[in-house]
Amino acid sequence: MQMTFRWYGENNDSVSLDQIKQIPGVDGLVWALHHRAAGEVWPEEEIMEVKKQADAYGFHLDVVESINVHEDIKLGKSTRDEYIENYKTSIRNVAKAGAKVVCFNFMPVFDWTRTDLYKELEDGSTALFYEKAKVDNMDPNDLIKQITNSGYTMPGWEPERLKTIKESFKAYEEVDEEQIWANLEYFLREVLPVAEEVDIKLAIHPDDPPWPVFNLPRLITSEQAIERYLAISDSPSHCLTLCSGSLGANPNNDIPAIIRRFHDRIAFAHIRNVRIYENGDFIETSHRTQDGSVPIDDIVKAYHENGFEGYARPDHGRHLWNEECRPGYGLYDRALGIMHLWGLWDAYELVKKKEERE
Ligand SMILES: [Mn+2]
């Protein structure tokens, strides 16, 4: 397991590279050109600028999250080919900076969805929260207002994407789930050969939450969906970002079982916990198994017993000790999360070594 930390870039993150450097066992930054809109080419010189900053601290840039997919590709519009060509160019360009994994998602219109970015937990910390009844009865525009008022440009909620929200919703009225699957396949048939050529793994992130939101279909929501996804191609570049928190919001998803089944296709592990309530609400908690509904201990065990050599990140964290930070992306709880994940990993490693000696 190679531990990474998501960093939003200079002047775009409350966490500095100095601080990340002091978290034990972190070798690389999960990065992106966040100012580049979906569909745009990522210019080489801007990528090399990030590389220079990372190099100064000895961090690798193996993992890109995300190169976003333009809505026209998801919708299968006639304009998609131009955006797909741009995507290929961006893949080639990030490879030049040493990238090995490109994370992406194929969620219609919205990226991740939450109703409250600062919901208080019983210990006084705050975390991202999803209230099911609220989303079921909410005007998407109200949600947009709430999320964009956080003071940061949230990935997946970029202003340029949200400007066209009404048209996007309208466009999806004519596209059903099967068509989106077909559009996803079309995209993959185009980009996978390029990814293979430059030795990059394209790792899809599951939908968050893993069910339809505002009547928009969601594809990557379960073990069966992952099975279907992986069957599209046997290219070594056809991989997964396995997000335990996203899939784990549905209690029917057995994450350790999914890891044990598909571990050789997991390029990037997002490891975090959520606590699920009986009414379908969920909140992001500490990484410790006992604090939520997702068995983080068994998840790390599943990776460890399969000799997982891919990348991992603690994904999100709570907001602790009055930290001012991007929602879900503070320093403290993600650092605690990393230490918990390493703690589990090292303990499993110790047991394994002892067993081998006996
Ligand atoms: Mn994730």
Image (spheres, rainbow, N blue to C red):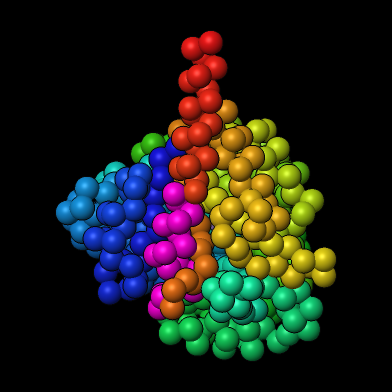
Residue 263 percent coordinates (x, y): 59, 34
Examine the structure image and report whether residue 336 is included in the region drawn in magenta.
yes
Q: Is residue 355 visible?
A: yes
Q: Nearer the viewer, residue 285 or 250?
A: 285
Residue at 39% from the left image edge and 55% from the top image edge: 5
Q: Horizontally, is 285 left or right of 14 in the view?
A: right
Residue at 70% from the left image edge and 67% from the top image edge: 282
Give the total of numbered labels. Answer: 0
Residue at 54% from the left image edge and 17% from the top image edge: 355
Identity of the residue furthest to the right in this view: 278
Q: Nearer the viewer, residue 340 or 231?
A: 340
Q: Nearer the viewer, residue 76 or 130?
A: 130
Task: Indicate whether 320 appears above or below 165.
Answer: above
Q: Quadrant of the N terminus?
A: top left
Q: Which residues are magenta?
A: 323-339
Q: Is residue 232 visible?
A: no
Residue 220 percent coordinates (x, y): 67, 53
Examine the structure image and report whether residue 73 is included in the region drawn in magenta.
no
Residue 90 percent coordinates (x, y): 36, 55
Residue at 56% from the left image edge and 76% from the top image edge: 124
